[in-house]
Image (cartoon, rainbow, N blue to C red):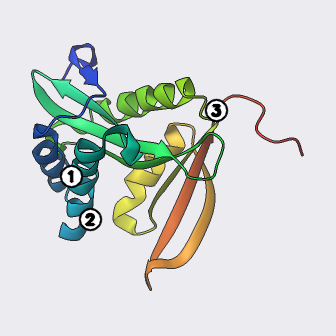
């Protein structure tokens, strides 16, 4: 079993990350080619535009290899609401707690930016059941289900994790 203490993290983006992200996302077997291309495009946008791209990254590395990553950013026209665009762990390292630790560290970074909520969406298809359970285990709440969003038989499920108080003055 992999020792989680051996993971290192970085939030800088370098040119090699495009290939690493492609390898990670491809290895999961969850995504279509066009979705994989989008994941890589976000890295490329960050490299070209820097922080102005709005895309922030956290990479988890083990033995010099990038084994997981998250991509997130503040949602335009909000105060402290963040989208978690991507979180993925290479299939070789899944099931060892890397994803949970990566998510926790991403949440800490968002909280450090005065983030008050993290929003994440995923598919309602059966193969994404482990993903949906992962978010629930990590303290996210199902906020909405949009029927037939991705395709006639593919709902969009939205989760949220509220960070700190106050959330609402209702």
The total number of labels drawn is: 3
Q: CA distance from mark 2 to mark 3?
A: 29 Å
* First-in-chain label (1 vs 2): 1
Residue 39: image x %, image y %?
A: 26, 55
Q: CA distance from mark 1 to mark 2?
A: 9 Å
Are circles 2 and 3 on residues that touch, CB within 8 Å? no
Whether residue 74 sits left or right of residue 66 in the image: it is: right
First in sequence: mark 3 vs mark 1: 1
Mark linked to residue 35: 2
Quadrant of residue 72 within the rendered picture: top left
**Residue 52 drawn above or below residue 10:** below
User: Which residue is identified by label 3?
Assistant: 163
**Which SS class for mark 1?**
helix
Q: Is residue 143 left or right of residue 135?
A: right
Distance between the Cα atoms at labels 3 and 1? Answer: 27 Å
**SS assignment at label 2:** helix
Badge 2: residue crowd in 10 Å (few <14, some 14–19, many ≥20): few
From the viewer's perspective, tell me whether residue 81 is left or right of residue 55: right
> Residue 106: where, in percent of width, then height?
43, 31
Q: Are marks 3 and 1 in contact (CB under 8 Å)?
A: no
In which quadrant is the N terminus drawn? top left
Contact between labelled residues 2 and 1, with CB atoms less than 8 Å apart = yes
Q: Residue tagged by mark 1?
A: 25
In this view, the residue in front, 105 or 14, is 14
Which badge, 2 or 3, is on the more N-terminal residue?
A: 2
Comparing 50 with 106, the one in front is 50
Q: Residue furthest top?
A: 5
Badge 3 marks a residue whose secondary structure is loop
Q: Is residue 1 visible?
A: no
């Amino acid at each position: 079993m992999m020792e989680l203490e051996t993971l290192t993290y970085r939030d800088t983006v370098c040119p090699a990350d495009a290939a690493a992200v492609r390898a990670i996302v491809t290895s999961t077997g969850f995504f279509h080619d066009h979705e994989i291309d989008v994941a890589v495009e976000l890295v490329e946008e960050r490299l070209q535009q820097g922080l102005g791209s709005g895309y922030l990254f956290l990479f988890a590395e083990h033995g010099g290899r990038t084994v997981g990553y998250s991509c997130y950013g503040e949602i335009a026209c909000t105060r402290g609401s963040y989208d978690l665009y991507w979180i993925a762990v290479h299939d070789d390292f899944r099931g060892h707690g890397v994803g949970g630790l990566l998510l926790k560290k991403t949440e800490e970074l968002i909280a450090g930016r005065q983030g008050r909520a993290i929003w994440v969406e995923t598919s309602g298809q059966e193969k994404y059941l482990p993903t949906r359970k992962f978010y629930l285990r990590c303290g996210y709440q199902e906020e909405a289900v949009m029927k037939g969003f991705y395709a006639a038989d593919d709902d969009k499920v939205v989760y949220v994790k509220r960070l700190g108080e106050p959330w609402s003055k209702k």
